[in-house]
Image: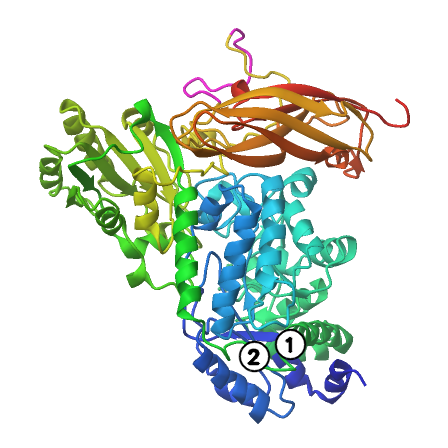
């Protein structure tokens, strides 16, 4: 008999509910701490899964309790939030998204899986795929940015990277795509708030990345905490059971978010734990993370006819099947059996440094202030100049803050012959600005000022929405004083911003000579920043989210529909603000490097297509800059006339090309014509005849794009 059916036939109700329960260990705190001792319950087979435990020793100890002391010996599934690295931290996901580099995304996930597997872990609660167009929301930091196409590319790469070629391997992690879905559309950018959006927005913006994750074979999916039009995602049978499992064919494990099943009571859709548990089970949620709702609520739900044993058995089967696919039955100690070689860790740190540098987003570089010329004396100021632990950004997992390289340490190592003068000036937060005078005194005699400003690691991520996403504390006072003093002495100011979101800083971007958005570069931050400031590496980051001039523009994104009265400076009655331009301060895809690329010779082949065709989009690039650099070329489309108003631009591809100074090269982006389908009036995918504009260039800033036209044919039309 099949192992799973055999076990199921022998399991008591308590043991079945144990397999549907995941309890937190104490290594990390990622939600409200709910007291409870797991060891006895594991021995009794009444807890079958854990989270927030790290280290081969502790993991094997708990595994031993389950495998060798419980009645049925079912191994534990142990997961952790490995969002952008495990012990070695890579740039935060929003920064990585800006690389537009599928191979890099897959590689960092693969490296994180290797490191986490060596620590005994078998699941990560990643990738986070919530599209966000609102910098107030703290979790923008851990997501793919504003664009659904980019999010689908990230979804595929991350699932491949985490899960590897063989899910049973010692270095494979079950990926868990989250948070299904539309969590990034929380009302007013406020964490955990309701979401209300059209079916069209759901299908065009928020579902595609999850469909891509399912198609890539993602092992698990986590519903969002939020309600969508009044139905909490944890109980959303329509989207979890009918859409995800039915239409998209997801047959993996649905794991609730932390305590989310019990929170159905607070949502006001369940009167007690039994009702909450029944709603979640009926929607298809298999594992209850940290609510004990299944263990303590489902027995009563069964008695009250709110749930059935068949539903419980179906959920238990999916959990046992995942454990089997992970090889946990074959060898529960495989993960963590072999410590990693030091060379592997060193290689990983080098990768973190390389990607940390490439992911840096150069927003402004007036008079090519960067890369810095050889300098006798540099002045590095600001509360984030010597702040290694803050460099991790949110979700630092098992990252070791004391081992992160801060800016000051990176500069000292990267500019060994330069005198580096440092002062914090002000704290990250708080009203004390008594240190500004000392900071200003450091400027005299320096050849450049590096002003390190922004947010701390905890000011973005979960439960970290900000109604005013600007510089916290007295940092603006410091910046304005530094700009005035430095410019009075002819000293250029390079602002280096650390944040988990676009900060609203038009005044700083206007006055600083260069602005480098570092987001949070991870463990090797200081070395990465020094590599870019010195010119050893050209920054290649592009912003995956539009940077607003004013918060009043939010939600702000490039893929807007045209409106019947599109902005027209010569016509008063058109779509505009009286006080702020419509355009972002920096457009989606914007990012400077140390090269200067000229685009020419756009060719589309074929120009007339049917849905089965593949279009080859080619163009030439020439680097007319003084430094080698890597260019990211974006391919957008615009369907001018369709059965439904279509966005002014839609991202449908991108490619990268590195060129030495003076060199030229050809770029090709392959566009399957089927990608030009969109949800029609009834939301079913349609491919409509007519003209579609193709635009290629360095960002969503229309004025910088080369254009062409495709003709779509259907049945000869
Ligand atoms: C948190 C987060 C989720 C995370 C889980 C476990 O509340 O919402 O993303 O994976 O709990 O830490």
Quick one: which residue is furthest to the right in this view? 715
For the residues labelled 1 and 2, the Cα–Cα distance comes to: 8 Å
**Residues at discs 1 and 2 in contact (Cβ within 8 Å):** yes
Percent position (x, y) of residue 49?
57, 76
Residue to which mark 1 is pinned: 327
Quick one: which residue is furthest to the top in this view? 570
Crowd tier of the residue under label 2, counting other residues whose Cα lies within 10 Å: few below 14, some 14–19, many 20 or above? many
Q: Secondary structure at mark 2?
A: loop
Magenta highlight on residue 68: no
The number of callouts visible is: 2
Q: Secondary structure at mark 1?
A: loop
Q: Quadrant of residue 222?
A: bottom right
What's the residue at 30%, 44% (across, down)?
Answer: 530
What's the residue at 27%, 48% (across, down)?
Answer: 407
Answer with left or right where residue 611 lies relative to residue 707: right
Against 391, is 101 above or below? Answer: above
Question: Camera-side residue: 550 or 253?
Answer: 253
Percent position (x, y) of residue 420?
16, 43
Q: Quadrant of the N terminus?
A: bottom right
Percent position (x, y) of residue 196?
60, 43
Type of colouring? rainbow
Highlighted range, magenta: 570-582
Q: Main secondary structure of the magenta part?
A: loop
Q: Quadrant of the C terminus?
A: top right
**Residue 486 in sight:** yes
Q: Quadrant of residue 602?
A: top right
Residue to which mark 2 is pinned: 334
């Amino acid at each position: 008999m099949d192992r799973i059916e055999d076990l199921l036939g022998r399991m008591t109700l308590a043991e079945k509910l144990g397999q549907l329960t995941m309890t937190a260990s104490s290594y990390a705190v990622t939600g409200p701490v709910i007291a409870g001792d797991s060891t006895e319950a594991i021995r009794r087979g009444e807890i079958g899964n854990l989270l927030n435990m790290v280290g081969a020793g502790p993991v094997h100890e708990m595994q031993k309790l389950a495998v060798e002391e419980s009645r049925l010996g079912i191994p534990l599934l142990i997961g952790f939030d490995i969002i952008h690295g495990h012990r070695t931290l890579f740039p935060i996901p929003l920064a990585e998204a800006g690389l537009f580099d599928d191979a890099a995304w897959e590689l960092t996930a693969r490296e994180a899986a290797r490191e986490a597997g060596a620590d005994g872990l078998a699941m990560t609660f990643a990738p986070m795929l919530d599209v966000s167009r609102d910098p107030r929301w703290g979790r923008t930091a851990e997501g793919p940015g504003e664009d659904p196409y980019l999010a689908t590319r990230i979804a595929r790469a991350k699932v491949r990277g985490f899960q590897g070629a063989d899910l049973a391997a010692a270095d494979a992690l079950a990926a868990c795509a989250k948070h299904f879905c539309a969590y990034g559309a929380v009302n007013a950018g406020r964490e955990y708030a309701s979401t209300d959006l059209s079916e069209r927005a759901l299908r065009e913006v928020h579902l595609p990345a999850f469909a891509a994750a399912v198609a890539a074979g993602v092992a698990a999916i986590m519903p969002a905490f939020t309600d969508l039009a009044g139905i909490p995602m944890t109980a959303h049978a329509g989207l979890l059971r009918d859409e995800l499992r039915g239409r998209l064919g997801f047959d993996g494990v649905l794991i609730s978010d932390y305590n989310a099943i019990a929170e159905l009571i607070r949502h006001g859709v369940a009167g007690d734990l039994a009702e909450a548990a029944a709603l979640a089970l009926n929607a298809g949620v298999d594992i209850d993370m940290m609510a004990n709702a299944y263990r303590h609520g489902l027995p009563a739900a069964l008695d009250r006819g709110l749930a059935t044993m068949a539903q419980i058995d179906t959920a238990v089967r999916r959990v046992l099947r995942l454990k089997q696919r992970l090889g946990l039955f074959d060898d529960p100690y495989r993960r963590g059996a072999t410590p990693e070689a030091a060379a592997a860790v060193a290689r990983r740190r080098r990768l973190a440094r390389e990607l940390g540098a490439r992911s840096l987003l150069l927003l402004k570089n007036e008079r090519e202030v960067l890369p810095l010329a050889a300098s006798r004396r540099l002045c590095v100021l600001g509360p984030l100049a010597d702040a290694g632990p803050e460099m991790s950004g949110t979700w630092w997992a098992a990252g070791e803050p004391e081992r992160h390289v801060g800016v000051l340490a990176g500069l000292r190592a990267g500019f060994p012959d330069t005198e580096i003068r440092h002062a914090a000036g002000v704290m990250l937060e708080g009203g004390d600005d008594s240190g500004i005078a000392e900071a200003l005194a450091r400027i005299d005699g320096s050849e450049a000022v590096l002003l390190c400003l922004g947010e701390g690691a905890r000011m973005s991520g979960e439960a970290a929405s900000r109604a005013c996403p600007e510089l916290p504390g007295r940092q603006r006072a410091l910046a304005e004083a530094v700009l005035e003093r430095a410019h009075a002495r002819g000293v250029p100011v390079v602002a280096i911003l650390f944040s988990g979101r676009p900060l609203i800083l038009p005044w700083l971007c206007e006055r600083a000579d260069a602005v480098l958005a570092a987001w949070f570069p991870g463990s090797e931050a200081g070395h990465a920043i020094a590599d870019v400031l010195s010119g050893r590496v050209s920054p290649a980051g592009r912003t995956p989210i539009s940077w607003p001039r004013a918060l009043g523009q939010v939600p702000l994104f490039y893929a807007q529909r045209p409106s019947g009265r599109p902005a027209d400076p010569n016509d008063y009655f058109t779509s505009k603000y009286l006080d702020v331009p419509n355009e972002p301060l920096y457009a989606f895809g914007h990012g400077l490097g140390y090269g200067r690329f000229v685009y020419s010779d756009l060719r589309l082949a074929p120009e007339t297509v049917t849905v089965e065709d593949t279009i080859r989009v080619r163009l030439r690039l020439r680097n007319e800059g003084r430094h080698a650099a890597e260019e990211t070329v974006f391919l957008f489309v615009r369907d001018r006339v369709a059965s439904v108003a279509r966005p002014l631009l839609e991202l449908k591809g991108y490619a990268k090309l590195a060129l030495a100074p003076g060199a030229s090269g050809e770029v090709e982006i392959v566009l399957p014509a089927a990608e030009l389908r969109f949800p029609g009036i009834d939301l079913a995918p349609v491919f409509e005849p007519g003209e579609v504009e193709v635009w290629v260039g360095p960002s969503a800033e229309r004025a910088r794009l080369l254009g062409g036209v495709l003709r779509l044919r259907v049945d000869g039309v």
